[in-house]
Image (spheres, rainbow, N blue to C red):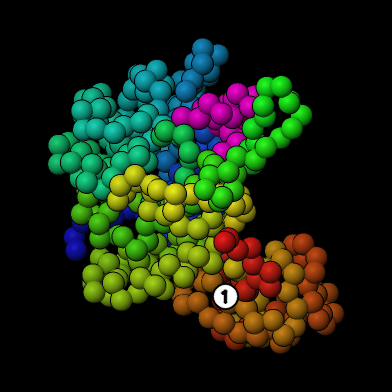
Amino acid sequence: MDNKIELLAPAGDIEKLKIAVLYGADAVYLGGTSFGLRAKAKNFDYEHMKEGIDFAHAHGVKVYVTCNIFAHNQDIPQLPGYLKELEELGADAILVADPGVFAIAAETVPNMNIHISTQANNTNYRSALFWHKLGAKRIVMARELSLKEIKDISCNIPEDMEIEAFVHGAMCISYSGRCLLSNYLSGRDANKGACSHPCRWQYYVTEKTRPNEYMPIVEDDRGTYIFNSKDLCMIEHIPELAEAGITSLKIEGRIKTCFYVGTVVRAYREAIDDYMKSPELYESKKEYYLQEVAKASYRGFTTGFYYGKPSDKDQIYTTSSYIRTYDFIGMVLDYDENTGFATVEQRNKFVIGDKVEFLRHGGEVFSQEITEMYSIQGEALTQAPHPQQIIKLKVDKKVEKWDMMRKEAKDPVTLE
C-alpha cells in the first residue's frame, strides 16, 4: 500500500491539539477566536495558535485553520488581517465555505492552501471542478454522499485535488451542517459557530385550542428525539474509504474531551497503519478497533450515508444521552524511572484497589491495579477524589507525559 491516508483530528484547545498530535494524527484542524464554526470550543488566540502550530510542526503534523463561517458584511473588514496573521504563523491551510471569504483569501494570501469545507455542500464533481479551477487544493465531501458517489467524484477531478471526508463523530441533522433551527429557536447562529444543538432536544406538540397541553411526538412508540442521529463510525470500513478515493479521514469533535480525542485518534491510527501494512492484519483486528473507539463516549454507531440513506436504525428515539463505558481518570505529567512512580493529574475519582488502564501514546495499552499512591507532599492516600489533584502513583511499567488513565465506568449510560 503506497497511497498515504491522512488522519485528520480535531483540536479544540492547546491540550487537545497536543493529545491529537502525540496519539497519531497526521494533521489537526482548529479554530481561531473568530471566523470558525465552533464558538463553544475554547479555540486559539494568537499565542496559543503559535504554540500549537510550532508543536505540531515539530512533530511533522500539519495544521488547518477553520475560516468556514458564512460571513456577514461586518465580518469582511477584519478578514484580510486575520488571514495574513495565519500565514505568518505557518498554518498549512484554511477551511473555507463562503465564496466571498474564498475570494478574500485568494487575494490576501495567494500562497495559502485553501480547503473547501463540508459547509459548502459539495455533492457532485462539477462543483469540485468549480472550486479546483479557482485554486482550491482540497474539497471536504458533504456528509450526505455515499461511497459510490464519492468514488464517482474522485474519478472526475484532477489528481492534484484531494478529497477529505468525515469518518467519525457526531452527525448533524441539517444538510451539510447548514442549520437554521438553532438561530430560530435560541437566537444562536449555527452558521457562525454558535449552534445550541436543538436537534438533541426533546419535542412535544400542542393543539391550537389547548395551548398548555403538551403531547409527546411518538414515532412507532420509540420516543420523541426525532432529530437525534447516532454517531458516525467508519473504523471497520477503512478499505472502502480508501477505494473511494478519500485521502483524508476526518474525526469530528472539537468540543469533545482530550480523552475522546486521544482514544479515537489512537484507534484510527492503529487501524490505518495495520491496513497499510497488511489488509489481512486489519481485517483480523476489526472487533478490537471498534472496542477501542467505544471506550470514548458515543451515541451508538452508524455508517451514515456511506452505504445509502440512513433508516430508523440510525436514529436514537429514546434519549439524547451518550453511552459511556469508561471514565477518564488521570493525565500523566511525569515519570521517575528510579522509583517507578508517575506524577498524575486526577481527572475523575479513583481509589486504591481500582483496576485501571494506561492509554499510552508511545506504547501498548496496559492494565494494573492501583496499589500505592501519595499526595504531592508525601502523604499516603487511599483515594483521589479532588478534581485535578496532583498524585504520585506507583505504576507497573514506564509511562510518559500525556499518557492517560482510564477505568471501566461503574454506572455506564446505556441505550435501549
Q: Position of residue 287 (x, y in %)?
A: 39, 72
In this view, 25 is above or below 11: below
Q: Position of residue 283 (x, y in %)?
A: 28, 72
On the question of residue 39 being in view, the answer is: no
On the question of residue 326 being in view, the answer is: yes
Q: Residue at x 68, y 22 (%)?
A: 208
Residue situated in front as seen by the camera: 180 or 403: 180
Residue situated in front as seen by the camera: 397 or 150: 150
| Residue 133 forms part of the magenta stretch | no
Q: Residue at x 29, y 33 (%)?
A: 123
Q: Residue at x 15, y 37 (%)?
A: 156
Q: What span is colored magenta in the figure?
A: 178-200
In this view, 20 is above or below 119: below
Picture quarter with the N terminus: bottom left
Q: Secondary structure at mark 1?
A: strand
Q: Position of residue 125 (x, y in %)?
A: 21, 33
Identify the residue under disc 1.
358
Could you say which quadrant of the image residue 204 lies in? Answer: top right
Could you say which quadrant of the image residue 329 lies in? Answer: bottom right
Q: Hey, what amino acid is under mark 1?
A: Phe
